[in-house]
Amino acid sequence: MARPITLFTGQWADLPFEEVARLAGEWGYDGLEIACWGDHIDVSRWDDEAYVQSRRDILERNGLQVWAISNHLTGQAVCDDPIDVRHRDILSDRVWGDGDPEGVRQRAAEDLKDTARFAAKLGVTTVNGFTGSSIWKAVAMFPPASDEFIAAGYQDFADRWNPILDVFEEVGVRFALEVHPSEIAYDYWTAKATLDAIGHRESFGFNFDPSHFVWQQLDSIAFVLDFADHIFHVHVKESITNLDGRNGVLGSHLPWANPRRGWTFVSTGHGAVKWEPLFRALNAIGYDGPTSVEWEDAGMDRLHGAPEALAFVRKLAAITPPDAAFDSAFSTKTDESA
């Protein structure tokens, strides 16, 4: 069976959930990866059966299903240091509270536990999101960050996330961290360190998004193959680089789509991701979950980009693993020619 193609609603949370579902259904998406902000999902209402059913009803009315929900914004605050005005801009009033940093982190952790509970009530087994990081601020390694300082950051992550993962496991849900700048895992080696920090818990894996690998010049296929057991979910999103000697890989604090940026996000099919070999790698590891379009392109109308991205991914769906009949025919042909 072909992997389902979903639309991540994170970049559509300015619209009512009903409207996003209507658009996605009309375009032909199989389902939604539902963001836990805007009016799309309020995780604090996980034990409100009528509210949970209202999400199902909206999906059903539009011919859609759900395989994953996502709580990136709240997850960011679990480990971040500092907590500042940037977080006030992305967090709910419930999580922000009085803005005391440690209080924000603790409320964010409780919100992630409720996210797992909501997912379970919705019949979903994967929650995608961010973790935040107390050591991302030291990525430039100056002022010098000692081994002890970095180790303390991974320990802080483990101390804060192990109790969250306990709840995930209690309700039968997995957490998929999107390997991403500003998270505890943002590249290949930090992904390994992150898994080590929590003892490779089975409930913790990755939401693989190759757009964050392009500008870091990382090998997406190697990541998929090496972390095969930890690929819980896949985002279909792209980025491009424009490193002309003036533009740098860190983006220069310039807005998205500014031509002076060294890299920026673009709509699926318009970037530098090598999708065909990547889909072949996903086939090789047996990934059969959603391929979720995270539409993000500051230089394109999303009402054009989202259905165009769906058509692009539909073509990639032709890259499927060989079936048993193919294997049998190939083996017979090989034997006859020997």
Image: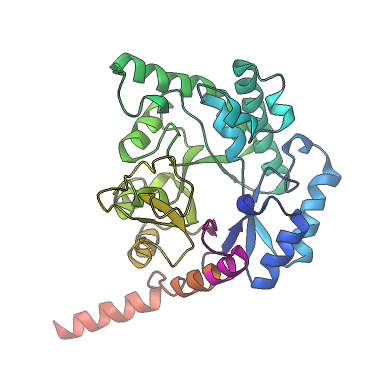
Give above or below for 64 relative to 318: above
Q: What residue is at 79 percent from the left and 65 percent from the top?
A: 61
Q: Which residues are magenta?
A: 292-308
Give the image quarter of residue 66. Answer: bottom right
Would you say residue 338 is visible in this rendering?
yes
**Quarter holding the C terminus?**
bottom left
Q: What residue is at 29 percent from the left and 49 percent from the top?
A: 217
> Toward the viewer: 227 or 303?
303
Give the colour scheme of this rendering: rainbow
Is residue 293 a member of the stretch shown in magenta?
A: yes
Task: Give the residue furthest to the right.
Answer: 50
Q: Is residue 170 left or right of residue 22?
A: left
Residue 95 picture location, percent across and down? 69, 27
Q: Is residue 242 left or right of residue 77?
A: left
> Toward the viewer: 72 or 164?
72
Give the image quarter of residue 146. Answer: top left
Give above or below for 177 relative to 29: above
Would you say residue 1 is visible in this rendering?
no
Give above or below for 15 relative to 335: above
> Toward the viewer: 1 or 238?
238
